[in-house]
Image (cartoon, rainbow, N blue to C red):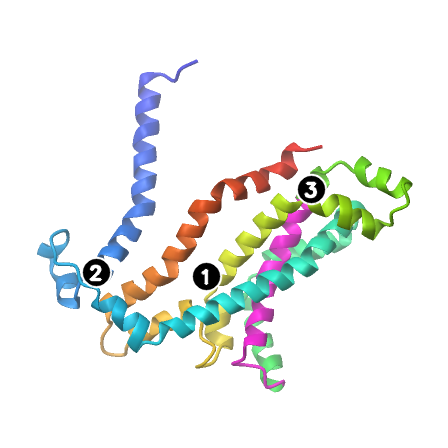
Amino acid sequence: MKPRGPYRIFRAVALVLVVLALVAPLVWMVAASLKTNVDIYDTEKTFSFTPTLDNYANVLQQANYVKFIGNSLWVALAATVLSLLLGVPAAYSMSRFNMKKSALVVLMARVIPGVSLLVPWYYVFSNLQMVGGFTVLILSHMFVSLPLIVYIMMGYFDGLPAELEEAALVDGLTHIGAFRRITLPLSVPGVATAGILSFIFSWNNFMFALVLSGADTKTLPVAIFDFVGYASIDWGGLMAAATVVTLPIMVIALFVQKYVVSGLTAGATKG
């Protein structure tokens, strides 16, 4: 049945409002990054202004943001790869061997606010003289990535037929061999989904990096605050830095969205 006229109008209006609410801040951010600070404060130049790339030049050259981009890439990639290496086998074990108590611990780690662990983490890592290094950043980001990967992959493994592994065991494979040769190749979409989401969360993580990073290990979300001073704010540079942080993730999400959706739904539809 086709939707009625009033419902179609309501749906169209609601869709437009949601899109505007999501897109308008991004459009304003990109537009402000192309303005001078004088133009940003001038309401008459909200839509009519002369674009400039000076803010991006300041971000990429004077503010040394290329180094911060490298820091963010290194921390996000390392945290994602290590979390996948630990999380995928853990999720498989919890799914296949019905380890409900372990799954409950992972779920608790997933819902515990990270801010509640920052003080004890800082105390422990400062005593170990690790604060300010990449190691502590990667470990802290893994706290977010690892439970997420386990949570996603458990649902995916639950949806895969166990009969395939049982047949492999009958043929002489061990559980590890069946996982490596049968289950893991079938779970590539789920692994890709978990890895992509883990990378995105790590790239955007601000709280852990703010407390645990040093001057040479800043990530992009923390480095943005270099444009916020005590007396004034460099809005043009701030918006250009925010654009540098946001656009790569938006491009990645745009190209991999169908894989993420298929990976998240596959575990719920198989079996």
Q: Which mark is residue 186?
A: 3
How would you rate the neighbour count of disc 2 (Cα within 10 Å): few for under 14, some for 14-19, many for 20 or more? many
Query: Residue 144, percent across and down?
Result: 58, 61
Mark 3 near mark 1, Cβ–Cβ under 8 Å?
A: no
**Which quadrant holds residue 182?**
top right
Residue lying at the far top in this picture: please name it: 1
Q: Image check: 125 left or right of 89?
A: left
Q: Which residue is mark 1?
A: 204
Mark 1 near mark 2, Cβ–Cβ under 8 Å?
A: no
Q: CA distance from mark 3 to mark 2?
A: 46 Å
Q: CA distance from mark 3 to mark 1?
A: 30 Å
**Which quadrant holds residue 117?**
bottom right
Judged by its main secondary structure, the magenta piece is helix
Q: Disc 3 marks which amino acid?
A: Leu
Q: Disc 2 marks which amino acid?
A: Leu
Q: Disc 1 marks which amino acid?
A: Asn
Q: Which of marks 2 and 3 precedes in the sequence?
A: 2
Query: Residue 120, percent across and down?
Result: 60, 76
Q: Which of marks 1 and 3 precedes in the sequence?
A: 3
Q: Image check: 69 left or right of 263?
A: left
